[in-house]
């Protein structure tokens, strides 16, 4: 009779460890699933941000092109000659050759 009681106690002891192992495995699988879903959420967030960033970049490039055109138009010789004829800029004159300083290129 004592031997059977000992076998039952040992069986209960091993059954308890099985439940602990199963619980631990479920916990690990749940944690892995959580990390995977979190990774997918971050990836989806980045994918959703791409069109907004693309639109912003396109707007910046268009603004850059517009400003380049404005600078070229302002610095064109025709526009500078027109500015020379205006009274606000009539005091500006061409410099003398002796007043021009040329810096050597390095």
Image (spheres, helix red, strand yellow):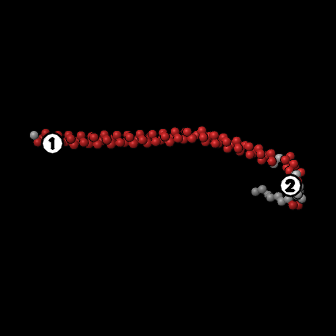
Whole-percent x, y for residue 87 in the image: 88, 54
The residue nearer to you, when weighing 87 against 83, is 87
**Which residue is at a point 31% across and 41% down the rendered structure image?**
23
Task: Say which of marks 1 and 2 sits in front.
Answer: 2
Label whose residue precedes the other's in the sequence (1 or 2): 1
Can residue 94 be seen at all in this image of the molecule?
no
Label 1 secondary element: helix
Residue 36: mark in rendering: none
Whole-percent x, y for residue 38 in the image: 46, 42
**Which residue is at a point 55% across and 39% down the rendered structure image?**
48
Label 2 secondary element: helix
Residue 88: mark in rendering: 2
Which image quadrant: the C terminus?
bottom right
Whole-percent x, y for residue 31 in the image: 39, 42
Quarter-wise, where is residue 4 in the image?
A: top left
Q: Residue furthest front?
A: 87
For label 1, the residue is 6
Q: Residue furthest bottom?
A: 98
Quarter-wise, where is residue 1 in the image?
A: top left
């Amino acid at each position: 009779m004592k031997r059977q009681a000992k076998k039952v106690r040992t069986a209960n002891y091993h059954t308890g460890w099985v439940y602990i192992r199963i619980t631990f495995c479920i916990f690990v699988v749940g944690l892995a699933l959580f990390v995977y879903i979190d990774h997918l959420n971050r990836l989806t967030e980045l994918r959703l941000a791409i069109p907004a960033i693309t639109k912003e970049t396109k707007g910046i490039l268009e603004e850059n092109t517009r400003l380049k055109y404005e600078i070229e138009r302002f610095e064109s010789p025709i526009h500078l000659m027109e500015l020379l004829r205006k009274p606000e800029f009539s005091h500006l004159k061409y410099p003398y050759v002796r007043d021009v300083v040329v810096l050597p290129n390095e």
